[in-house]
Image (cartoon, rainbow, N blue to C red):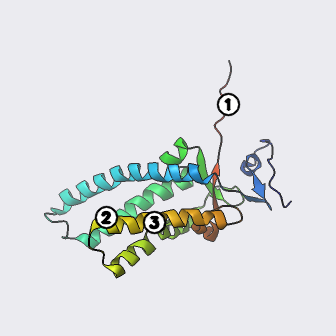
Amino acid sequence: MSEPSAVAAQGSDPSSRFEMRDQRLLAAPLVRRMAAFMYEGVLLFGIVFATGLVFAVTTHQTSGMKLRGAFLAVLFFVVGLYFIGFWIRSGQTLAMKTWHLRVVTDRGRPLTPRRALARYAAAYVWFLPALALAKALMPVNGYAVAGIVVGWITLYALAALLHPRRQFWHDALCDTAIIFEPPAPPRVS
């Protein structure tokens, strides 16, 4: 089956509800995925703020440079718990629920802990290359760093359009897919 076809929602197979190509899922629309990405950033701000507050109080941190490496490690762990926990439990973070998206394997199955961990690590390609470039260029202000990061994120997101199934490249690497899951119609009583 070389052309995408919609398959009726029947049976217990979760992949039967989604558009597939060569028995692998097509990605949700890019605009919807990027809207969820932006909303995820808002939610992560709260998680990072709360983590920073608890870390600063428990370690008696008086300077942002004091214990900086330890703080970054704690952030990596806490943000990982957030993403991996939601991906394993329901396949959806809070932002993904809002935008009716779900992360599954490219065959429509729920993520295993190992695959979720691999996806979490691979997803850092959203930021790390841009931050490395900013460090190498040593821009004069924060606006230049922000421009480099936003430019990279935009290019990376648009690169998904080059993928045959429109997946982000870290999803292709991990054999995962972000799919659109339409809301169930309301039940009439």
- Asked if residue 143 is positioned above or below residue 108 in the image, the reply reads below
Looking at the rendered structure, the secondary structure element under dot 1 is loop
Callout 1 touching callout 3 (CB < 8 Å): no
Separation (CA) of disc 1 from disc 2: 45 Å
Marks 3,2: beta carbons within 8 A: no
Q: Residue furthest left?
A: 62
Mark nearer the N terminus (1 vs 2): 2
Residue labelled with disc 1:
185
Question: Please, what is the three-letter code of the amino acid marked with disc 2?
Answer: Tyr
Quadrant of the image occupied by residue 169: bottom right
Residue 44 lies, with reference to residue 150, above or below; the image says above
Please tell me which residue lies in front, 54 or 37.
37
Q: Residue furthest top?
A: 189
Q: CA distance from mark 1 to mark 3?
A: 39 Å
Q: Is residue 138 left or right of residue 22?
A: left
Residue 36 percent coordinates (x, y): 51, 49
Mark in front: 1 vs 2? 2
Residue annotated with mark 3: 151
Q: Give me the residue at 80% from left, 42% from top.
A: 8
Q: Where residue 143 is drawn, which disc sits there?
A: 2
Q: For numbered disc 2, what is the local secondary structure?
A: helix
**Residue 154: image x %, image y %?**
50, 62
Which amino acid, mark 1? Pro
Q: Position of residue 29 (x, y in %)?
A: 63, 51
Q: Which mark is residue 20?
A: none
Farthest residue in the bottom direction?
Answer: 136
Q: Residue at x 55, y 49 (%)?
A: 92
Of circles 1 and 3, the one toward us is: 3
